[in-house]
Amino acid sequence: MTQAFLASLGTVSRPTSAPPEAPVVNIIEPRSAASAARTPDAGMPAIDPAAECERIERAIRDAVGTRLRRRGVVLGVSGGIDSSVSVVLAARALGRDRVAALLMPERESSPSSLELGRAACAVAGVRPEVTDITPMLESFGCYRRRDVAISRVLPAFRPGDRFKITIAEDVAGSDRVSHFHVVASLSARGGAIEMARLPVDAYLEVVAATNLKQRVRKTVEYTVADAHNLAVLGTPNILEHALGFFVRGGDGLADLKPIAHLYKSEVFAIGRHLGLPESITGQIPTTDTYSLAQSQQEFYFGLPYATLDVIHWCRAEGLPVERAARMAGMTPEAIGRVYNDIDRKRRVAERLDGAALLVEGAPCRGAYERGGSR
């Protein structure tokens, strides 16, 4: 990393603790520390988009130029609000020539993803590179493995039939451990929609196969990063990062995560401040993983993001269920169930995001005698 580049990023210091290859999980101070002086009864404070953008941009410059010592960043842009905000913030922080934006559709991606991704890159002033990952997924058996698992549950299911996976239970309305349904439009029955409960083994096989989509995209990102000395920028918000809505070795993998401290509603507010189009800032968050349209709510979170933002903030602040119930417009019993669900998901997230476990202690070796023999 040259002094000229450091100067161009406005950095003046050298890293003292994190080596270039160390991942920067969160480059912004944790929300709990930032909000320690707040009065909980005041409610969830509103974000200042302009000030927060400046703070994040400074953090990106410091992370890339000083701590990671990279020439710039690379990120996948799906057209969703998180990646759209991230590409604009990165371009503002580093300059558009130091941002590599990748659009990585596959045959089951929403037709609007490319359009929205290009729109976000246009606001950022970045020219995206498009890589269709369908051939890679086919070679890994992504679609075939998944179709075989679904056909065991829905015998009329055929390759190419559109489908999605949904949560069966309302997390706020039931104490039962939720299970999942597969919902499919069956071509063999004239496009009729059928639903069936997914046994655990079939569910795991479907998820394992579709997780290849996130892992292949991340492989493409790191290939570009290695070729051009770039840092990989992750795009999760705090709900995704803290509650485990990511794939280990896939979209959970990054060198820096500049918006992982922001709630979804806050990311939308920043997106509007940055001038992203209504087609991006007004959309319902989706997974864009399965061939039938699917919201993040029905697949994982079980609640609208605006409601979950409030409840998660209350949980993080240690507020009692009665206070959270008044803020969210729900019963204390329902809030208690959501609190429990948040705690379960946070434990999952810790496992997904944790370092590999090592065998502790010194190895078992025989006595060593000076001179070469034992």
Image (spheres, rainbow, N blue to C red):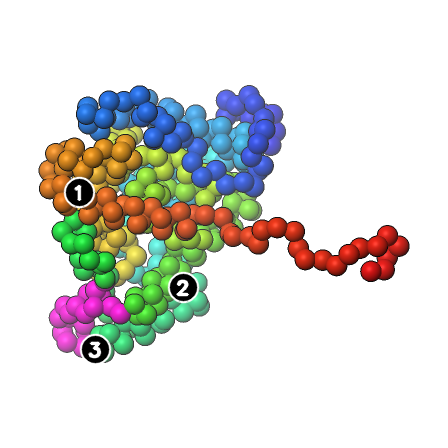
Q: Is residue 117 visible?
A: no
Q: Position of residue 276 (x, y in %)?
A: 27, 35
The one of 156 and 261 positioned closer to us in this rendering: 261
Q: Nearer the viewer, mark 1 or mark 2?
A: 1
Q: Label 3 is placed on what type of residue?
A: Ala
| Residue at the spot of label 2 | 137
Q: Nearer the viewer, mark 3 or mark 2?
A: 3
Q: Is residue 28 visible?
A: yes
Q: Position of residue 206 (x, y in %)?
A: 32, 66
Categorize mark 1 by other alpha carbons within 10 Å: few (<14), some (14-19), many (20+).
many
Q: Secondary structure at mark 2?
A: helix
The residue range painted magenta reads: 180-199
The alpha-carbon separation of the residues under discs 1 and 2 comes to: 40 Å
Q: Is residue 192 left or right of residue 223?
A: left
Q: Is residue 61 left or right of residue 286?
A: right
Q: Is residue 191 magenta?
A: yes
Q: Position of residue 331 (x, y in %)?
A: 11, 42
Q: Secondary structure at mark 3?
A: loop
How many numbered tags mark residues here? Answer: 3
